[in-house]
Image: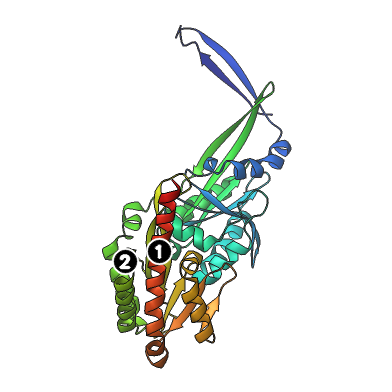
């Protein structure tokens, strides 16, 4: 059993040292508690990490933990009870590649349906993500990052992870050790291989200018340039108080609201999305808060265009639009709906101010 000896420095007499002997906790005891400890304290894995899944199912089996970092990237964590061996590398690549293969709509539903398990908060992942990152979905275009976690790792595993990291794969390796002194238990973390810093380049590609360029190229590729401009212009005209954020695959429109703590934040009400799999079409996607703000207009939309309108289990609503008869027929109702959304938001703000 590993023993570590430390020395405590007397703050009043720097020449006086006191020995502190720590004894390693049995691995079996640590294994049974480590995952629960990390779920309760995700910052031990990564500062600012939000865990959104535990035992989330993939084609290769359930992945241990799924998180989102401060920049909006998905992080897959594979944990081993004991020493990490090289089969864990193949396993985590399998899990990450499965998530990477899903389109955004399927990914949102997949994570939402499996949240709320064993200490993970139950959330509507799409709504949470849109609010957290002000409607910017660009980080989800990046492949998920991978983090292996265990109570030690063999040399072959360290070598393989280090090699993958050097070649540009977002993979890291973390080991934990537990030590005891009397009734106290100390947890030690060792980052064996760090995630590659791609910053400057990757983070700063999420600028308005870069996103506009990417969106322009996607619109040209899907033959939706004219349609996207027409719908964007209509929303700008009827929702003058909305904040607009261009993403690489669409535009989101948000209003300023206050959190429960009284802090102002942008909350997305609706978005326009483009998909390569749906050429010549633009998806108009409404959040539940938009529907609440204009219930009468949305009831009218459902009644008059029920064959084109789709509701999601999370309370959102979307409609696919193309140039042509449907758009021309829908245009007056859509104009009124957008006006009611803005008016509903203004009434909500007024009511909130009166209650304070």
Q: Nearer the viewer, residue 64 or 206?
A: 206
Point 69% across, 37% down: residue: 30
Query: In this rendering, is residue 263 above or below 52?
Result: above
Q: Residues within 10 Å of mark 1 (few under 14, many from 20)?
A: some
What is the quadrant of the C terminus in the image?
top left
Q: In x, y percent, where is residue 59?
A: 64, 68
Coordinates of residue 90 in the picture (x, y in percent): 59, 60
- The residue indicated by pointer 1 is 138
Q: Quadrant of the N terminus?
A: top right
- In the displayed structure, would residue 108 be above or below residue 88? below
Please identify the residue farthest to the front as the structure is shown.
354
Seen as rendered, the residue at the extreme left is 209
- Dot 1 falls on a residue whose secondary structure is helix
User: Is residue 81 placed above or below 26 in the rendered structure?
Assistant: below
State the separation of the CA atoms marked 2 and 1.
8 Å
**Residue designated by label 2:** 211
Q: Does the image show residue 153?
A: no
- Comparing 350 with 268, the one in front is 350
Numbered disc 2: secondary structure: helix
Residue 100 relative to residue 85: left or right = left
Coordinates of residue 227 in the picture (x, y in percent): 33, 83
Name the N-terminal-most of marks 2 and 1.
Answer: 1
Badge 2 density bin: few <14, some 14–19, many ≥20, Cα 10 Å: many
Q: Residue 237 occupies which quadrant of the picture?
A: bottom left
CB-based contact (under 8 Å), mark 2 and mark 1: yes
Q: Determine the residue positioned at 46% across, 73% down.
A: 285
Residue 185: x percent and y percent?
65, 28
| Residue at 51 percent of width and 74 percent of height | 317
Residue toward you, 66 or 153: 66
Apparent side of residue 101 relative to residue 81 in the rendered image (left or right)? left
Observer able to see residue 95: yes
């Amino acid at each position: 059993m590993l023993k570590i000896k430390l020395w405590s420095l007397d703050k009043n007499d720097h020449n006086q040292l006191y020995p502190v002997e720590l004894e390693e906790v049995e691995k079996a005891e640590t294994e049974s508690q480590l995952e629960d400890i990390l779920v309760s304290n995700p910052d031990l894995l990564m500062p600012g990490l939000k865990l959104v899944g535990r035992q989330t199912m993939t084609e290769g089996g359930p992945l241990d933990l799924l998180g989102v970092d401060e920049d909006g990237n998905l992080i897959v964590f594979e944990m081993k009870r004991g020493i990490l061996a090289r089969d864990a590398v193949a396993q985590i690549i399998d899990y990450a590649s499965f998530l990477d293969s899903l389109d955004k709509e399927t990914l949102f539903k997949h994570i939402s349906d499996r949240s709320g398990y064993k200490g993970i908060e139950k959330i509507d992942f799409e709504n949470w993500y849109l609010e957290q990152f002000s409607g910017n979905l660009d980080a989800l275009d990046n492949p998920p990052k991978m983090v292996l976690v265990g109570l030690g790792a063999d040399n072959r595993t360290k070598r393989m992870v280090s090699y993958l990291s050097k070649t540009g794969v977002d993979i890291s390796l973390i080991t934990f050790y537990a030590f005891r002194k009397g009734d106290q238990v100390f947890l030690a973390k060792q980052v064996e291989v760090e995630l590659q810093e791609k910053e400057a380049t990757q983070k700063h590609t999420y600028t308005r200018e870069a996103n506009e360029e990417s969106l322009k190229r996607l619109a040209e590729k899907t033959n939706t340039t004219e349609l996207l401009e027409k719908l964007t212009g209509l929303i700008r005209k009827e929702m003058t108080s909305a904040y607009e954020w261009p993403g690489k695959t669409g535009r989101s429109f948000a209003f300023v609201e206050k959190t429960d703590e009284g802090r102002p934040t942008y909350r997305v009400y609706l978005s326009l999305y483009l998909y390569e799999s749906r050429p010549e079409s633009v998806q108009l996607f409404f959040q539940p808060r938009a529907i609440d703000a204009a219930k009468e207009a949305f009831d009218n939309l459902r009644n008059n265009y029920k064959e084109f309108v789709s509701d999601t289990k999370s309370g959102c609503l979307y409609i696919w639009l193309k140039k042509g008869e449907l758009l021309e027929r829908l245009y007056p109702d859509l104009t009124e709906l957008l006006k009611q959304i803005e008016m509903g938001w203004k009434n909500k703000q007024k009511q909130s101010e009166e209650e304070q």
